[in-house]
Image: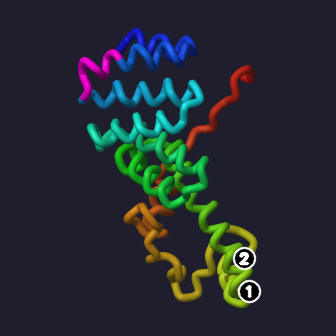
Amino acid sequence: MKSGVALGREKKYAESAAELRKAIELIPDNGPLWYNLGMSLYNGGESDAARRAWQKTVELRPDYADAWYMLGMLDAKEGRSAEAIAAYAKSSELKPQDGEAQAALVIECLKLARRKYEQLQQSDPARAKKLAGEFPGNASPALGSGKHPLADTEIPGTGKTFDELLEIFKRTPFQRVQPKGRQ
């Protein structure tokens, strides 16, 4: 395993994947081996094979947050929002202090909400306008009744309501990442 991971760090992804496959033949039920194989395959441009490796990872180790995150990332890139949200939610649940997973979950929820809102604008402009009035100029809902109308709405694939996800997002410590070369 170590040589496969080391080869991956050296950006020798095909060689890394070959070494990791050899290790998997010896220890087929090792989740981290499958995860690292997925990383080498993904970085080598083999997204479909990477997905299969990460699916095997979470089959063996349902608590492997990083594999759930990577599955969410692939789903998001492929425009499968509900699946991405479910995977990011699982990753966030397993690693609640992972600001990157929390942010990815919120971003994917917002992208889905935007697409649904645009569809609503086409199908029912009056209702879309009324909904837009709930968010005057920013992301703060009008709280006339004390609670936003979507507060108890379950977000698909998460098992959590809008308010529960909002609370998770509020508790997540975010750190600004300094771009390389600008220390």
Q: Is residue 33 visible?
A: yes
Instruction: Determine the secondary structure under disc 1.
Output: helix
Give the CA distance from mark 2 to mark 1: 17 Å
In front of the other: 8 or 56: 56
Quick one: 69 or 167, which is closer to the camera? 69
The image shows residue 35, relative to residue 73, as above or below, that is above
Q: Quadrant of the N terminus?
A: top left
Q: Which residue is mark 1?
A: 125
Viewer can see residue 173: no
List the residue tagged with mark 2: 136
Asked if residue 23 lies in the magenta stretch, the reply is yes
Give, as a three-letter code, the residue at label 1: Pro
**Quadrant location, the C terminus:** top right
Q: For numbered disc 2, what is the local secondary structure?
A: loop
Front residue (pair 136, 124): 124
Q: Main secondary structure of the magenta part?
A: helix
- The residue at the point 51 percent across, 38 percent down is 48
Give residue 50's position: percent from left, percent from top: 47, 34
Magenta residues, start to end: 22-28
Rendered view: 12 above or below 116 = above
Please rate how many residues cluster around mark 1, counting C-alpha atoms within 10 Å: few if below 14, some from 14 to 19, many from 20. Answer: some
Horizontal arrangement in the rendering, residue 39 relative to residue 33 (left or right): right
Determine if the magenta segment contains residue 173: no
Q: Residue at x 46, y 50 (%)?
A: 88
